[in-house]
Image: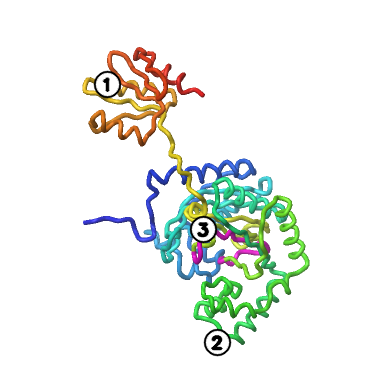
Amino acid sequence: MKYEAPRGTHDVLPAEQPRWQRAIKVVQELCDLYGYQRIDTPIFEDTALFTRTSGQGSDVVQKEMYTFTDRGGRSLTLRPEATAPIARAYVQRGLFQESQPQKLYTVGTMYRYAAPQHGRYREHWQVSVEALGSDDPAIDAEIIHLYDTWLQRLRPRPYALKVNTIGDRNCRPQYVEALLGWLYANDHLLDDDARQKRETSPLRVFDTKNDAVRAALAGAPHLGEFICADCQKHFHSVRSYLNELGVAYEIDHRLVRGLDYYTRTTWEFIGPDEGAQSTISGGGRYDYLIEEIGGPETPAVGFGAGIERLLLATRPRTQQRRLPVFIARGPETRSEDVVRLLADLRDRGIRCDTDYVGRSRKGQEKRMSRLRPRLTLYLGSTVTIRELGQPDEQVRYEEAAVRVRERLRP
């Protein structure tokens, strides 16, 4: 029987790991620099957490959640996103009683049952950065700036940032009422997906991939005409801070996010690909989410960014990591000497390797051409240290590890 990875999943192979590890390392360094601390939550939660926060009518809840009943009869769901679990931990663990804002981030796998596409997997890796406990528009800009800096450090391909404000519970209801009136009056211009969203979460009709529907919605009421003064002031401040930070953006008044908990600021980073792969990161403010799950009134803002999408939007580095030391084997080389010297080198923090499959000298040289070791060691009665462009050096076995470390120093 031939086994394959489940549809919509993928293996991150050794050759791909350097890019992955660099992407994660850079964002962890940035989060530390910006004052965000790591939090890890379970990969599954009570299903109600996601239906309550994401919205019953959202695509995530309606079509994409991996939900199962455990042996105790509980309905559980593999996390489709990280914001709701972090919010749950914030309430359950009493983080709202600590100094605010709580600036948190996580790195982990998310699960969504959707049609697999290039860079879009059912199991995918995501970084989420969240600031809970502040309504300051400066922190909206800070989080956007963090992701923009992350992209810049990874050699991005062309990308754009779109921002919008979708108001709050004081002004958005009036807009939703006007939008619903227009949607019912123009039902013939909608597709079935838009009609379903109209009944459950009207703002999300703008989140459509249907070009004809998108063109028709250009005639719908304009959200900007309904935004209250407080939301306008907040959005103006976010834009002013982005200008101060040198983050380029464009305003997209039709930009909404796919989950119901967003308020005020929303944004998306758009990469060079078209279609479903165009959005490489998205986020926004969610000032009522903590309250929705039983916590105190807590303004909050954050983003989620898929690693796979991020790597599609950045240029790969062609240079491979170089192996510092390779121990070549000959017919007379004692395996005990190789094993002991490898251990001595590794005890000193020196990466090294040897041949384990009985290659000929020519075969080992071919492998070394790929590994590009700086030093090659040949074992005989003494250890010969060879470096391109330098004379060979013979040292005793007990001196070899120390001498190698000296040779490798800058």
Residue 266 sits inside the magenta stretch: yes
Give the colour scheme of this rendering: rainbow
Quarter assignment of residue 399 = top left
Residue linked to disc 3: 81
SS category of the residue bearing label 3? loop
Q: Nearer the viewer, residue 12 or 363?
A: 363
Amino acid bearing label 1: Glu
Amino acid bearing label 3: Glu
Of badges 1 and 3, nearer the viewer stands: 1
- Whole-angstrom CA distance, mark 1 to mark 3, is 51 Å
- Whole-angstrom CA distance, mark 2 to mark 1, is 80 Å
SS category of the residue bearing label 2? helix
SS category of the residue bearing label 1? helix
Is 358 rendered above or below residue 170?
above
Residue linked to disc 2: 188
Question: Residue at coordinates 56% horizontally, 65% vertically from top-left?
Answer: 259
Q: Quadrant of the N terminus?
A: bottom left
Q: Nearer the viewer, residue 386 or 181?
A: 386
